[in-house]
Each structure stands twice: as C-alpha cells, then as structure tokens.
Amino acid sequence: MPTKPQHARRYQAVTRLVRKLREDAGLTQRALGKRLTMPQSWVYKCEAGIRRMDISEFCDWCKACEIDPIIGLRRLLRAD
C-alpha cells in the first residue's frame, strides 16, 4: 500500500514547521485558529498531518504567526 502523501517525509517537515511557527509566535492552537477564522480542531489537524495545507493556507498561517511567508518557505526548504 502506498504511503499517504500527508505522511511522506517531506510533508512531515511541513507539519513540524507550522507547529514551530505557532509555538515561536507564542500562540495556542485556539488563538491561531481565531486569527485564521478557523476552529482549533482545524489547526490541530494541520499540525498532526491529518489535513494537508495548500500553499495559500501556509502563507496565511505564516502571516498569522507574524512571519513573512517567503521566510517560512525558505525554512521549509532548508528542513527538507
């Protein structure tokens, strides 16, 4: 059985990074969800790799954590 995309090694780097961005910003999942107008459960699912993020959601996440999305993407590429 093929590996689900959200569990691939590269995608695990995404989930680790988005959680780190949130934590470094000093935000709880609930507080970040509020900034994104999404429920806390959505934030949890993104961080846990249950739900995949698209690039626009990644950019919104970075902005909500007060990180330039370009810097966030560079950090992701270095983590790979």
Image: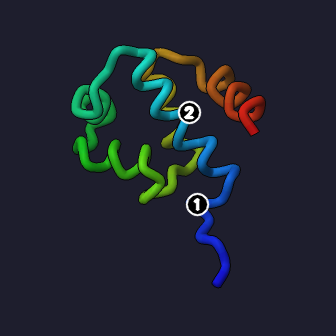
In terms of image quadrants, where is residue 1?
bottom right
**Total tally of numbered discs in the picture:** 2
- Point 62% across, 65% down: residue: 5
**x, y percent for residue 59:** 54, 33
The residue lying toward the viewer, choosing from 15 and 63, is 15
Q: How is the image coloured?
A: rainbow
* Residue denoted by label 2: 17
Seen in the picture, residue 10 relative to 50 is either above or below; the reply is: above
First reached walking from the N terminus: tag 1 or tag 2: 1
Q: Quadrant of residue 30?
A: top left
Residue at figure coordinates x 68%, y 53% from the top left? 9
Q: Please tell me the numbered disc located at residue 32.
A: none
**Crowding at label 2, few (<14), some or many (≥20) Cα neighbours within 10 Å?**
some
Q: Is residue 11 above or below residue 24?
A: below
Mark 1–mark 2 Cα distance, whole angstroms, equals 14 Å
- Horizontal relation, residue 60 to residue 72: left or right: left
- Left or right relative to 10: residue 64: left
Relative to the observer, which residue lies in front, 53 or 28?
28
- In the image, taking residue 56 as reference, residue 29 lies left or right, namely left
**Rendered image: mark on residue 7:** 1
Answer left or right for 46 relative to 70: left
The residue type indicated by label 2 comes to: Leu
Local crowd size for mark 1, using a 10 Å CA cut-off: few (<14), some (14–19), many (≥20): some
Q: Position of residue 78 (x, y in %)?
A: 77, 29
